[in-house]
Image (cartoon, rainbow, N blue to C red):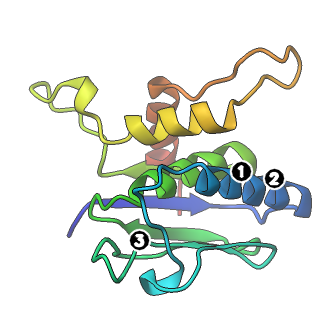
Amino acid sequence: MGYTHYYNLKNKASKTKWNRFVEQCKTLYKNLPSDISVKGSGGKGQAGFGVDGVTINGDYDLDTYCEDLFLTPDYLGFEFTKTNRNDYDILVFACLIAANRTLGLLFKSDGYTDHPDYPKECNDLLPAMNYYNQTIDPKNKITGDPDLVTEDELWLIRKKFNNQRT
């Protein structure tokens, strides 16, 4: 089937929350390393970040594309994005973290493993988690202290995703 991220959103985004999510995705996109090429739908054109939706994929011409991450402010329900671990996966997963933090989106990913022989540091999601933390620099709304995404938080989000009723 390929390396995939699964996600579900039960409530429509308010305009304020949607705009915050889009701004975070734009910031993540603008700060990507220069060797990662991100395009729009089908791996062509420009990635889209706006009031109508967020659309990102890898680069068709470089054969680093797979499926689009496409979210809209009216989006509700279950979806998935297969990235096959192509370079743009770091942006896809960082945007899913942003969607969780701003919109309440729940997700799980093939990047998790609970196999005892698979070292924790090999978790495919850690680079995107670290990229999100470094780029967005999330702060606690009350204290202003760092409010970084942690591995434990990713596991909790996955658990909530698995326990929800679709």
Farthest front residue? Answer: 34
Q: Which amino acid does label 2 sit on?
A: Arg
The residue carrying pointer 1 sits among few (fewer than 14), some (14 to 19) or many (20 or more) residues within 10 Å by Cα, namely many
Which type of secondary structure does the marked residue at label 2 adopt? helix
The residue lying at 86 percent from left, 25 percent from top is 141
| Residue 142 in the image, given as x and y percentages of width and height | 89, 19
Image mark count: 3
The residue lying at 54 percent from left, 79 percent from top is 40
Q: Which amino acid does label 1 sit on?
A: Gln
Which type of secondary structure does the marked residue at label 1 adopt? helix
Mark seen at residue 20: 2
Mark seen at residue 24: 1
**Residues at marks 2 and 3, CA–CA distance in whole angstroms:** 23 Å
Q: Earlier in the sequence, mark 2 or mark 3?
A: 2
Residue at mark 3: 58
Q: Which amino acid does label 3 sit on?
A: Gly
Residue 105 visible? The answer is no
